Image: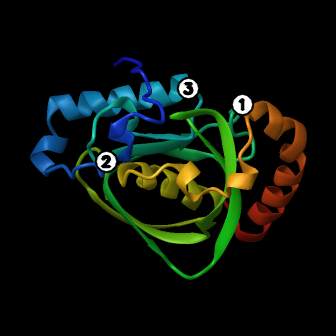
Amino acid sequence: MSVRDVVKIGDPVLRERARELSLDELRSPEMQALIDDLVETKRAADGAGIAANQVGVALRIALAEVVQPNPRYPHKPPIPLTVIVNPTIEPLDEGTFEVNEGCLSVPDLRGNLERHVAIRLRYLDRDGNDHDEVRRGLTAGTFQHEVDHLDGVLFVDRADPRSLATWEQFERFQRDAFIERITAFVDRVGS
């Protein structure tokens, strides 16, 4: 296992739709090693998730994990390590919420965007087992962010341009209002 370099905005791999994997590919030692490296890379960066194209590999593999305390995302509910392969997302209704996101591939920038409140997430786990799950709230937002990566979409593509801020400016001018709003949202809908 190793920590890989995270590619940054401007690298063409971040704008590609990642390719699906066959079960044989997924079960190969190379893909299992890639998944292990993604876990280590995400943890080293204190991220909430990471997609394979963020380390330069255009394959439909991503993962999410939030363990608290997390200095980048202290407001996010815990998410146990979840590896998603060939994922699809289907909104369950029209409900959306505004969230402030950042990204390991877009360093020192945050912005507000809309995410679906409730989604159906279908995927294979790292062993090739099928999953069909409903995710809600900030957890749903985390998975939407990662699947966007696999589709070549970055959070800045969806963000209100007037809301973009560096981490320092977010902390100074936007953090308190965001934490108040997102805490009320989590209290209302759950994770």
According to the image, label 1 marks what residue?
71
Residue farthest to the bottom?
Answer: 93
Q: Residue 178 placed where, x, y %?
A: 82, 52
Q: Residue 68 placed where, x, y %?
A: 68, 36
According to the image, label 2 marks what residue?
16
Alpha carbon separation for disc pair 2 and 3: 23 Å
Alpha carbon separation for disc pair 1 and 2: 30 Å
Instruction: Say if residue 50 shows up in the picture.
Output: yes
Q: Element under label 1? A: loop
Alpha carbon separation for disc pair 3 and 1: 10 Å
Amino acid under disc 1: Pro
Query: Which quadrant is the N terminus positioned in?
Result: top left
Q: Of the two numbered discs 2 and 3 on the same chain, state the one appearing first in sequence.
A: 2
Q: Foreground mark, 1 or 2?
A: 2
Q: Residue 5 placed where, x, y %?
A: 42, 21
Judge left or right: residue 149 versus residue 112: left
Q: Foreground mark, 2 or 3?
A: 2
Q: Element under label 2? A: loop
Residue 131 against residue 161 in the figure, above or below: below
Q: Element under label 3? A: loop
Colour logic: rainbow
Amino acid under disc 3: Ala
The mark found on residue 45 in the picture is 3
User: Could you classify mark 2 by the number of other residues whose Cα lies within 10 Å: few (under 14), some (14-19), or many (20 or more)?
Assistant: some
